């Protein structure tokens, strides 16, 4: 496997950064997860735009242009002979001194990994998944904007541990107000009385790119939808629930906190949106 590291393609075993990188010392950096389907990047511009927005939020100057990074992803895919892949693009703060000051790190490290990803087992896509509502809440916008996709994921990791402890694959996180925000690595949707409902970006979520694609598909299919704040009650009473994300794509949730959602099967609205999504990404995609 070849990894793109600061402008060069290097073998995986040589793809290394220093232990003095603030990305490692403090989780100081930003990243994106992007998919390539049949040799085409999915929503590349949206991902690159979000990367630069995330970097701006933490005052990190990315040492490449947006086009240079898109070209670098293409180069890395070709070097690995990949048409379908999950692409991880990161910009860390780079090497610095011990101590938080990011401005003592003059050279960010930029790297691109192309690989596969399988967040959830295939059968969960057919039968739906069980989740819990975590006690750990999502990072508040007053702490660090959740709209920035930074390398500091510990808050979500602690919620993910709650899920693993409960024997389920995912955890839904509430925001400070007690409303539903999103999952540890996916956005959240419910369907109630044939209407698609999802928390607004003001609920303190990552503005997911798959979320936006799904909202656009729902509009195109003339499925009623609303972005609004809601608490756990609406989830427990929902007819359907599903999650969206670059890695997960669309996955149905059929149980929350041990309680069955709807009739406990992948619902018709989830199916319609999943079919439309699959049509969009093409027939050759896997997991
Ligand atoms: N929320 C969080 C916290 C995430 O990490 C992700 C995955 N990047 C998402 C939502 C889904 O976003 P996207 O559709 O852009 O992958």
Image (cartoon, rainbow, N blue to C red):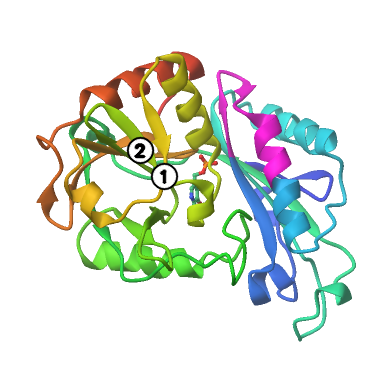
Quadrant of res 8: top right
Residue at x 65%, y 52% (from the top left corner): 31
Label 2 sits on a secondary structure element that is: strand
Q: Which residue is mark 2?
A: 197
- Contact between marks 2 and 1 (CB within 8 A): the answer is yes
Q: Is residue 23 visible?
A: yes
Please state if 145 lies on the left or on the right of 274 as rendered. right
Q: Is residue 36 magenta?
A: yes
Residue 178 versus residue 57: which sits nearer the camera? Answer: 178
Label 1, residues with CA under 10 Å away: few <14, some 14-19, many ≥20: few
- The answer as to whether callout 1 falls within 8 Å of ligand 1 is no
Residue at x 42%, y 56% (from the top left corner): 184
Vertical position of residue 39 compared to residue 113: above or below: above
Please state if 268 lies on the left or on the right of 196 as rendered. left
Please state if 85 lies on the left or on the right of 225 as rendered. right
Q: Is residue 274 magenta?
A: no
Coordinates of residue 156 in the picture (x, y in percent): 44, 63
Q: Which residue is mark 1?
A: 228
Quadrant of res 180: bottom left
Looking at the image, how many numbered discs can be counted on the residues?
Answer: 2
Q: Quadrant of the C terminus?
A: top left
Residue 267 versus residue 36: which sits nearer the camera? Answer: 267
Between the residue at mark 2 and the residue at mark 1, the CA separation in whole angstroms equals: 7 Å
Furthest residue toward bottom:
99
Mark identifier at residue 191: none
Q: What range of the chain is rendered magenta? A: 34-50
Residue 52 versus residue 145: which sits nearer the camera? Answer: 145
């Amino acid at each position: 496997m070849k990894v793109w590291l600061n402008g060069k393609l290097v073998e995986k075993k040589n793809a290394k950064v220093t232990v003095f990188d603030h990305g490692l010392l403090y989780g100081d950096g930003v990243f994106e997860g992007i998919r390539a389907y049949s040799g085409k990047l999915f929503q590349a511009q949206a991902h690159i735009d979000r990367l630069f927005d995330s970097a701006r939020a933490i005052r990190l100057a990315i040492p490449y242009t947006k086009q240079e990074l898109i070209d670098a992803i293409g180069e890395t895919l070709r070097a690995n002979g990949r048409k379908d892949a999950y692409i991880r693009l990161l910009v860390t703060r780079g090497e610095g001194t011990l101590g938080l000051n990011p401005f003592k790190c003059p050279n960010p490290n930029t790297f691109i990994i192309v690989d596969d990803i399988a967040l959830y087992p295939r059968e969960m896509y057919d039968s739906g998944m069980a989740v819990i509502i975590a006690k750990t809440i999502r990072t508040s916008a007053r702490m660090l904007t959740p709209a920035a996709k930074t390398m500091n994921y510990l808050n979500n990791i602690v919620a993910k541990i709650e899920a693993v402890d409960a024997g389920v694959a995912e955890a839904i996180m509430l925001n400070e107000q007690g409303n539903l925000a999103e999952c540890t690595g996916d956005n959240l949707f419910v369907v109630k009385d044939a209407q698609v409902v999802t928390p607004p970006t003001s609920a303190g979520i990552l503005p997911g790119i798959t979320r936006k694609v799904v909202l656009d598909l729902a509009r195109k299919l003339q499925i009623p939808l609303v972005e609004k704040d809601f608490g756990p009650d609406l989830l427990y009473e929902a007819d359907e629930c599903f999650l969206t994300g670059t890695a997960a794509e669309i996955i149905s949730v059929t149980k929350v906190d041990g309680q069955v959602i709807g009739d406990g099967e992948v619902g018709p609205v989830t199916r319609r949106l999943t079919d439309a999504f699959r049509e969009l990404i093409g027939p050759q995609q896997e997991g």
